[in-house]
Amino acid sequence: MAFIKTPVRGMPEQTPLEMELRNYVFNQIRKVYHSYGYLQIETPAIEHIENLTGDQGGENEKLMFRLLKRGESLQRALKEGGDLSAEGLRFDLTVPMTRFYANNMSDLPIPFKVMQMGPVWRADRPQRGRFRQFVQCDIDILGEATKLAEIELISATVEALSSLGFEDLVVKVNDRRILRAMALFAGFPQDELNDVYILLDKMDKIGFTGLRDELITAGYSHEITDKYLGLFRELPESTLSRSYFENNPEILSDIEIFENLDQILTATRSLTDPEVNIIFDPTLVRGMGYYTGTIFEVSLPGMAGSVAGGGRYDEMIEKYVSQPVPACGFSIGFERIIVLLEEQGLIPGFTDPRTAYLLDKDLEIGQIVELMQEANKRRVNGETIFIAARRRNVRRQIEELEELGYTQFEEISPE
Amino acid sequence: MAFIKTPVRGMPEQTPLEMELRNYVFNQIRKVYHSYGYLQIETPAIEHIENLTGDQGGENEKLMFRLLKRGESLQRALKEGGDLSAEGLRFDLTVPMTRFYANNMSDLPIPFKVMQMGPVWRADRPQRGRFRQFVQCDIDILGEATKLAEIELISATVEALSSLGFEDLVVKVNDRRILRAMALFAGFPQDELNDVYILLDKMDKIGFTGLRDELITAGYSHEITDKYLGLFRELPESTLSRSYFENNPEILSDIEIFENLDQILTATRSLTDPEVNIIFDPTLVRGMGYYTGTIFEVSLPGMAGSVAGGGRYDEMIEKYVSQPVPACGFSIGFERIIVLLEEQGLIPGFTDPRTAYLLDKDLEIGQIVELMQEANKRRVNGETIFIAARRRNVRRQIEELEELGYTQFEEISPE
């Protein structure tokens, strides 16, 4: 079989300059999360099929890469009628993290503040900015039922993003219970709420008129549709309108939900830079079906889609351990961040002084060793010293090194 | 299907304390290699089957995890008689790196000094210290035909290991051409050299007597066997015995090989700590069939096996690009290093001051926000501040946090 030079489709490879940026972003995010006491864990790339098909991964389960059982013959697999795979590549970090938690629970602190940074795989159709291997950066708090979790997750994530140089961040916050109450109040059947959410999720692209058309096309009555859209019109985005709900208790009577949201908004505004815009957005949906309360995402003005998203999922972990475990998490889309930093020119310069020693090919071994000893002394002081034979086309060699941040060149000839 | 709590067999998960150690080792190794100007790259975990079965992976190819083609039905696969997989997980970092080089050659500097740190997968039988997912740390120099490569790779790797606190490192150096000349001189048939090397490789476990028995059992004559062992007896380990070969040119007449090895040994001894023992070892084999010249490995006294290994492989890359590219590399066994650091107690302490604020559940939101603002100020100054609700059993909570390096605890009650 012929050797193939290009990487597998949709699987990016990272060049040296890309890796410098990725390492910088990795370290920056990790530093911020570490300062809040988040504990980093790592789980294997390969996970049991049973765990990857438990329905908590939603649509992502369909995109799983499955592994062939080692040594499995086709004939035998057919005869036994069995599945050809017992394992698959993880499609997110949440499924393995819940397994890790179930497996190590007795040794973990309460609350467990956990950070994960690592690749996940989805057999998706590759497009610009959508890869089949990509990195996620998640923080989660397990075992904290109150707003303490939301407030910290939002401020820590905003700080991580701000530390990378992003300005004018917009944080949208909503609560699944408000989303649900509004849809039920308008008259949508309970078992079709997810379909309604999927349409509502498009609102920032298609607007009110588009949403109205889609709901009618989907077969909902004009009455329900207009009652629903009327609610959003009455609720000005970006303020919580708690008084609106207090005056309309038939929509949602549990006023604690608003008190909770109110405090999350007020606290996170006090804890972040005034330029960060933290708003209540009743149209915010977030895709995953497992959210039970607060949901949130971060976007940048003029940029479609979000750069981070998360929320509370109090009912997921109980399925795997014998007790209820409240949980809340926030995930940064690492690849998205990288693309944006490149587009916005927020790439940090080379911070270490970089010098290249270019050696004449006729140098004696003794002189080479002396130079290497000198280089070692400079390296210990934080300098980067590159040593190589001087090429015939030294001008080209120097240009190549300049692109990699080298500013000093010493051409060494025999003494 | 039932959820499974434990990780897939042989696939380790890393707890928070393990991750602190792993990150420390990662950063330490990367820092040293970076100071020599090695450029980090990353390749996808998934690689074309064609590249993974090109025979350059040797025995490892048999241990490849294959991916099931997405949506492939068993029936159709059988009918078409095709392979069920077009892709597999990489079993080492060398195969993907050569693909990367072939794909990006025109944009890469010459020489290309490259560093890789990442997981690889082998469907091996798991044992203590042998995993089915494990991390490798490789440095390679492509495009440097002379000893400059070997000298730098050895000194950089020794420095990386020394920086982790390892003492009394032993570096064994040999040359595949000497290995070959000695076996041919003794009379072994050319096409059986690899079988002889496999037996020779066991010498440090079975000794001269054991090796003699194994060679005889394998069907070699007493004459050949004793002539071969006689050569090793005459060659005192740890000195190069160049004069021995000069006096016996019928073994190997190409004296440049010894001159080269001599200079590598002398130079690396001058460049490393005097406690590091750098020796010529004519019994050093190194497994991979692709080595063409110098080979080397690092071991620790009293420890079976090696912690790093590598060598020159001048003929591999030419297969994929249209020109000869000399190459030399050194790979650190990351998981081995982690186990040794733990065994030798070389685990660094927590360097950042860690404080926990434990909040009474009746605190007003205003007071919580003030505390969080104070915490943010301390975090900016490099402190780690953990904030959580105070548990009923606060003594247990403090013990848990002490294990994670927290030394200061502030229990906060309503004002």
Image (cartoon, coloured by chain):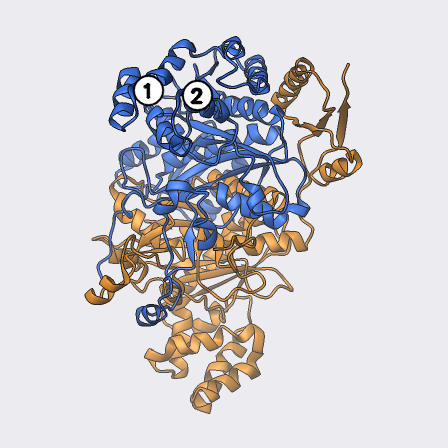
Chain colours: A blue, B orange
**Quarter of the figure with the N terminus of chain A:** bottom left
Give percent across and percent down for residue B150.
Answer: 43, 53
Give percent across and percent down for residue A356.
Answer: 40, 35
What residue type is disc 1 on?
A: Thr
Dots 1 and 2 on the same chain: yes
- Looking at the image, can residue B251 be seen? no
Q: Is residue A408 left or right of residue B406?
A: left
> Which of B13 and A381 lies nearest the eye of the viewer?
B13
Residue B219 position by quadrant: bottom left
Using the image, tell me which numbered label, if any, was put on residue A153.
none
> Which of B24 and B325 lies nearest the eye of the viewer?
B24
Report the Cα–Cα distance between label 1 and label 2.
11 Å
Chain of the residue where label 2 is placed in the rendered structure:
A
Q: Secondary structure at mark 1?
A: helix
Q: Secondary structure at mark 2?
A: helix
Q: Residue at x 45, y 90 (%)?
A: B223
Name which of mark 1 and mark 2 comes first in the sequence.
Answer: 2
Q: Residue at x 51, y 31 (%)?
A: A292
**Residue B305 drawn above or below residue B212:** above
Using the image, tell me which numbered label, if any, was put on residue A225.
1
Using the image, tell me which numbered label, if any, was put on residue A185.
2
Specify few, some or many for label 2: CA neighbours under 10 Å numbering under 14, 14-19, or 20 or more.
some
